[in-house]
Amino acid sequence: MSDVVFLVMLLGAAAGAGVLGAILGLGGGILLVPILTLFFGVSLPYAMGASIVSVIATSCGAAAGHLTSGLANIRLGLFLALFTVTGAITGASLVGIMPPRVLQVLFGLALGYSAFTTIRQLHVEVAESLATDSLAQRFGLHGAYHDHVLGRDVTYHAVRVHAGAAVMFGAGVLSGLLGIGSGAFKVLAMDTFMRLPMKVSTATSNFMIGLTAAASAGVYFGRGDIHPVIATPVALGVLVGSYGGTRLIARLRNTTVRKLFLPIVIYLAISMLLRGLGVLR
Amino acid sequence: MINVERAVSRVLLIGGSLAVVLMLVGLMTLQIRAARTAHPLDVAHVVENREAGRSIDVFVSLPQLARALGRRPPDPVAIITAGIVLLLATPGAALVVALVAFVRVRDRAYAVICTALLAALVGGFLLNVGG
C-alpha cells in the first residue's frame, strides 16, 4: 500500500470515528484502537497514542459545535470534570496497590445496571422532571436547548448529583488505574443517574473528555507513543468528522442516540466483567 | 455580558484547526523531502512496529522540540510535533479562557473549579514533558 493511500484511508477511518464520537460523547478510542491495530497494523502503543490525539481532537471539534448549539453545558462539564480528574489522579497513584480487577467487576456490574436502565428508557425522549437537587441549584446544573426534531425548547436540571459525582469519580479512578478513556461512563452518569437528556449528556461528555485526556496526554507524549505520521491524519479526520457530527446530532432524537449507545454499553459491560473475572486478558 | 460558551467554543475550534494545519504542513514537507531523497516514508512499515518508528525522530520533551524548531530549515517532524503539542494544550487554553470569563462575571465557584482543573492539567503535562 502506498503512503498516500494509507494516509487517506486512515483519514477516512478517523473521520468516521469523529462523527460517531460527536454523537455518542466518546473520544473514539473504543472505535479507533481496534481499527488501527486490526486493519492498519499499527502497533498498540502507537494506537493508544493516536487514541489520545483522537480524544482531544473530538473534544475540540464536537465541543466547539455543541457549546454554540447549547447542547453542551459548560458548568455541568466543569463541575463533573473535577471528580473525574480527582479520580484519575487517585487511580494513577493506586497503580500497583489496588488490584484493578475489583474495580472492573464493580464497573461491569454498574454498566450492566445501566444497560438494563437504558433498555427500559429506550423510548423516553426527555425524562420527567424529578424534585430538584440542592447541589444542582448551588452550582447551576441546569439549562435549556432548542430541539430541532421536537420543534421546541427543552429545559432540564440535574438530579441525584451525589450519585452522578460518585460515578464520575469512579470512572476517573478506572481511567487512571487502567489508562483507558471513560467517555461511556460519563454519558451514563449524566443520563442514567442525573436524568439529563441523552443529547445533553453526550455533548457535555464531549467537552469533558478533552480535559481528562489532556491531563494524561503528557504521559503518552513523554513516552514517544504519539507518532507524528499517524497523529496527523487522525487529528484532521477526527476534527472534521466530529464538527460535522454536531450538525448531525441536531437532527436526531434522544431515543435514537440512546439506541446507538446501547450496544457500546453492553459490549463494555461484558468485556469489563470478563476482564475482572480473569476470563479475558 | 460575556458568553462563556461562545468564548470556549472559539478557543477549541481555533486551537484544534491551527494544530491540524501545522501538522499537515509538517507532514507534506516530510513527504516532499522523502520523495526528493528517493527514500520513501514507507508509512505502513513505520507504524507496524515501534522500533521502526524510531527511524524518524520522535520528540518527547518540550526543550528538545524547541531546539529543533530553532534550526534552519526546521525539521518537518518538529513542525508536526509542534502541532501535536498545540492540540494537546488546547483544552488547557479553553480552561484559561473559561477561568477569565467566570472571573469577569464574578462566578467565584466556577473560577475556583477552573483553577483547580487547570492546576491538575498543567502539573500533569509538565511533569512528563518538561525535562
Image: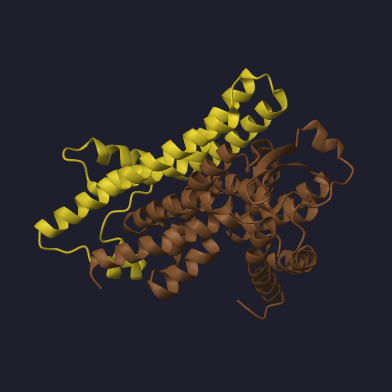
Q: Nearer the viewer, residue A4 or A131?
A: A131
Placement of B33 over or under B5, stated as above or below: below
Q: Quadrant of the N terminus of chain B?
A: top right
Question: In the rendered image, what is the letter of the chain coloured yellow?
Answer: B
Query: Taking B105 as reference, is A35 left or right?
Result: left
Residue at point 59%, 22% (across, down): B2
Residue B9 visible? yes
Residue at point 21%, 62% (across, down): B41
Q: Nearer the viewer, residue A188 or A93?
A: A188
Residue A182 visible? no
Query: Taking A270 as reference, is A121 left or right?
Result: right
Question: In the rendered image, what is the letter of the chain coloured brown?
Answer: A
Q: Residue furthest front?
A: A151
Q: Total number of numbered labels?
A: 0
- Residue A197 percent coordinates (x, y): 72, 50
- Residue B17 percent coordinates (x, y): 39, 42
- Residue B8 percent coordinates (x, y): 54, 33
Q: Quadrant of the C terminus of chain B?
A: top left
What colour scheme does the image use?
Answer: by chain
Residue at point 90%, 43% (across, down): A131
| Quarter holding residue B18 | top left
Placement of B106 over or under A13, stated as above or below: above
